[in-house]
Image: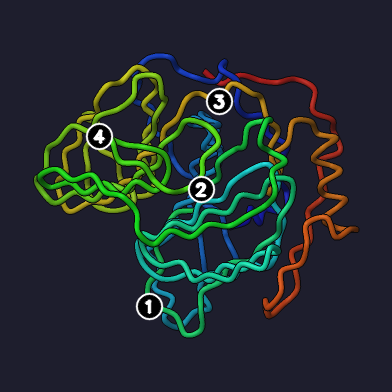
Amino acid sequence: MSNLERQASLTVCGGRGFVVAEPVRELLSPRHVRLGESTEVRRLLPNLGRRMVGAWVFVDHYGPDDIADEPGMQVPPHPHMGLQTVSWLHEGEVLHRDSTGSLQTIRPRELGLMTSGRAISHSEESPRPHARHLHGAQLWVALPDTHRHVEPHFQHHADLPRVTAPGLTATVLLGSLDGATSPGTTYTPLVGADLALTAGTETRLPLDPDFEYAVLSMSGETDVDGVPVLPGSMLYLGCGRTALPLRAASDAGLMLLGGEPFAEEIVMWWNFVGRTDEEIRKAREDWMTSDRFGEVKGYDGGRLNAPEVPANRLKARGRVR
C-alpha cells in the first residue's frame, strides 16, 4: 500500500534516542487519511508521539468497510525502496502486482511480504468481483543499512505457524513468538503476530524483554495491561517486558508488533526509506524520469505521480521521548 498524501514531509525515524527503555502504556490515536475513492485508513505510525516500534515504521489500519457497491482498494503502481511491505487481512481480498512480475491474490490471514530493497514498484486493488467487506492492516518494516539494497522480491505464505492457549490463537506472520517462527524473511530481530481472543479470555503473552512492543486493536474490546484499547488505536508498551496481560471483554482481534530497537537513524518520505534527503530526492527523480523502479504490468490504469519533496533541507534530527 502506498502513502498517497500529496504533502508528504521528510520524517526522521529510528535511533535509540526515540526508545523508551522501560515498560510504559502510551495510547496512540490515529490520523485519518483518504486512500483512493472509497477507502479511509487510520494511520498509527509514524505518529506525533511515536515514530517506530523496532523496525516497524509504518502502520495503517482500514475497515471493516462495506465495499459491495464500491471499487474498494485501488492503489495505482507506485515505488518503494529501503523497506518491506506487509499486507495483512481479516476480511476481503487484495490483488498484488509488482515490477518483478509477481501476481498474487492475498486473502485473510495470509502473509503478503514485499521486500523493496534497492527499488520496486507495485499496485494493489480489490479484485473484480470482490467480497462485500474489506478489513486489514498495511505495515512497513525498515531495512537495515546492510540489507537495504538487496534485490527486490515478493513472498506469499498462506500457511503460517500458530501459538494457542485457552481463548487465544496467535498467528505468527513475521519473526518468532513463544517458539513458533514465521517463514517470512526478516532482516532485523522482530515479531509480528495476529491475536484472536474469545470473549472473557484472560491470558498472559510471553515477550522478549530486549524488544520494544506495541499492540494494534483490529476489532472488539480488549484491555492490554489494564488499558482499554479500541479498534483503530495502538498502545505503545516500551521495553523490558517478559509478559503481556490481555483481557477480552468480547471476541477481539489484535496485532502484536515488536522488535529490537532500530539503532540507525533513517529518513522516510512518501514511499521511500533512505538515510539522507539527497537520497530521497534522487529516488523521487528516478521514479519520475527513469526505469529504476521497473514496470507493473497488467494494471488497468496509469501509475502514481510523486509529490514534490519539501524545499527545505533536513538539518536537525529531533528526538521523541
Q: Which residue is mark 4?
A: 224
Query: In what element is the residue under mark 3?
Result: loop
- Residue 33 spot, x, y in % from top left: 56, 54
Q: Residues within 10 Å of mark 4 (few under 14, many from 20)?
A: many
Q: Which residue is mark 1?
A: 132
Q: CA distance from mark 1 to mark 4?
A: 31 Å
Question: Residue at the location (58% across, 61% down)?
Answer: 35
Q: CA distance from mark 2 to mark 3?
A: 16 Å
Q: Nearer the viewer, mark 3 or mark 1?
A: 3
Left or right for 87, reference 293: left
User: Where 32 sits versus 128, above or below?
Assistant: above
Q: Considering only order in the chain, which callout, 4 or 2, is on the residue closer to the N terminus?
A: 2
Question: Amino acid type of disc 4?
Answer: Val
Q: CA distance from mark 4 to mark 3?
A: 24 Å
Q: Are marks 4 and 3 in contact (CB under 8 Å)?
A: no
Q: CA distance from mark 3 to mark 1?
A: 39 Å
- Image disc number at residue 139: 2
- Residue 20 spot, x, y in % from top left: 45, 17
Query: In what element is the residue under mark 4?
Result: strand
Q: Considering only order in the chain, which callout, 3 or 2, is on the residue closer to the N terminus?
A: 2
Question: Residue at the location (68% across, 41% down)?
Answer: 82
Q: Residues within 10 Å of mark 1 (few under 14, many from 20)?
A: some
Q: Which residue is mark 3?
A: 262
Query: In what element is the residue under mark 2?
Result: strand
- Image quadrant assignment for residue 9: top right
Question: Amino acid type of disc 3?
Answer: Phe
Q: Nearer the viewer, mark 2 or mark 1?
A: 2
